[in-house]
Amino acid sequence: MGAPGYSPYHDDLPAHAPMPGAPPYPPAEEHPPPPIGRPAARTRFGMTLAAAALWATVNLVLVLVVTGAPPSTTDVARFLGALLVPTLLAALAVWLIARRRAWPFWLLVLAAAPFFWALRAVAAQAGG
């Protein structure tokens, strides 16, 4: 019956059963029904803005430690203005990713880091 080496398939195993000799599948966990009349928790833009602002603060502290205080208030205003755009864009990018459910703040901070530093590097390169 069939080609040499062919062994016919026996359909005596129940559907979706593990291989013979394997441990059984764990029982399926019961999920609670979705809440009715109550919207799901979502990540607010303010939380992502705070996460990105934390990295802007880290950038400000690093610049002050390395270069010292700026010589004039105009330089301070220019530097803070240069931090504003990467901070807002990083917060927007993280919010677009995390807006569907509530993320813990530490995860927002981790997600904001690559966006903020990449945008900060582009802004520094474009600014001269």
Image: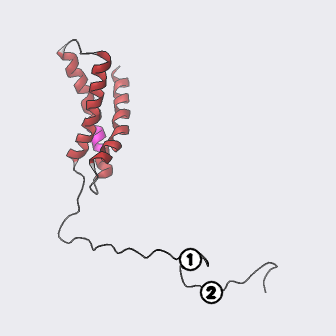
Q: Is residue 51 above or below residue 27?
A: above
Label number found at residue 74: none
Residue 104 placement (x, y as % from top left) = 28, 51
The numbered mark, 1 or 2, whose residue comes first in the sequence reads 2
Residue on which the image places disc 1: 18
Quadrant assignment for the N terminus:
bottom right
Q: Nearer the viewer, residue 55 or 80?
A: 55
> Dot 2: within a 10 Å radius of its alpha carbon, few (fewer than 14), some, or many (20 or more) residues?
few
Q: Is residue 52 above or below residue 15?
A: above
Is 87 magenta? The answer is no
> Dot 1: within a 10 Å radius of its alpha carbon, few (fewer than 14), some, or many (20 or more) residues?
few
- The part of the chain drawn in magenta is 88-92
Q: How far apart are the alpha carbons under marks 1 and 2?
A: 14 Å
Q: Is residue 56 above or below residue 34?
A: above
Residue 82 placement (x, y as % from top left) = 27, 26
Q: Secondary structure at mark 2?
A: loop
Type of amino acid under label 2: Asp
Q: Residue at x 33, y 22 (%)?
A: 127
Q: Is residue 23 left or right of residue 36?
A: right
Residue 64 placement (x, y as % from top left) = 27, 20
Q: Is residue 98 above or below residue 74?
A: below
Q: Residue at x 55, y 75 (%)?
A: 23
Residue on which the image places disc 2: 11
